Image (cartoon, grey):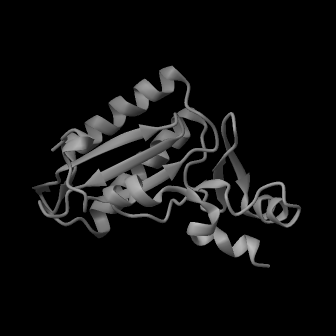
Amino acid sequence: MYVPYNQLPDNARVWIYQSNRKFTPEEELQISELTTSFVEQWTRHGENVKGSFVIKYHQFLIIAVDQDFVEVSGCSIDASVKLVQQIQNLFKLDMLNKLTIAYKTKDDLQIVSMADFTQMAKNQTIDKQTVVFNNMVNTKKGIEEQWEVAAKDSWHARFFNA
């Protein structure tokens, strides 16, 4: 059962899928249609799931579910991953690579490998104040409060302590 993202509670569970590149406007429209259709039919052992999604910065697909309504696990989570795999294949994207890091520059958002991020921290190309995307957050409230943070305030801080 699809509901608008802003109607989900703060404790809604989220999964963040970061694309290796920005979605084109056409892709974003199709991704929205595919994801809406998926969420409308999403079930857990025959029970409807109350969920939603949001696309941020034309590069992140965030899927959310109200676990107070029905708690998802195993097969229902696997189904959402299959949706992301379908999107990847359809648009030639990489959205499941957990070894890339997104951060903000003055003008844009950048995606680099973890190795490159480590080197940039070492070379002081970026610093502890660099705004990073903490894709480890897992609630809607976490998206609002802990997703876009200074590197020093997330797991990324370890790259500056070496």
* Residue drawn at x 50%, y 21% as measured from the top left: 25
> Which is more toward the observer, 6 or 34?
6
Q: Give the image location of residue 68, x and y in percent.
A: 14, 64
Closer-to-camera residue (66/120): 120
**Residue reaching furthest right?**
123
Residue 155 x %, y %: 59, 71
Q: Residue furthest bottom?
A: 162
Which one is nearer the viewer's eye here, 138 or 63? 138
Q: Quadrant of the N terminus?
A: top left
Percent position of residue 122, x then y: 85, 67
* Residue lying furthest top: 26
Total count of labels = 0
Residue depicted at 73% across the width and 52% down the height: 112
**Quarter-wise, where is residue 49 in the image?**
bottom left
**60 to 11, vertically: above or below:** above
**Eyeballing the image, is 83 above or below 36?**
below
Seen at 34% across and 39% down, the residue is 35
Q: In percent of the image, x 48 and y 48: which residue is there? A: 85
Q: Which image quadrant: the C terminus?
A: bottom right
Is the residue 34 above or below the residue 156 in the image? above
Left or right? Give the position of 73 relative to 160. left
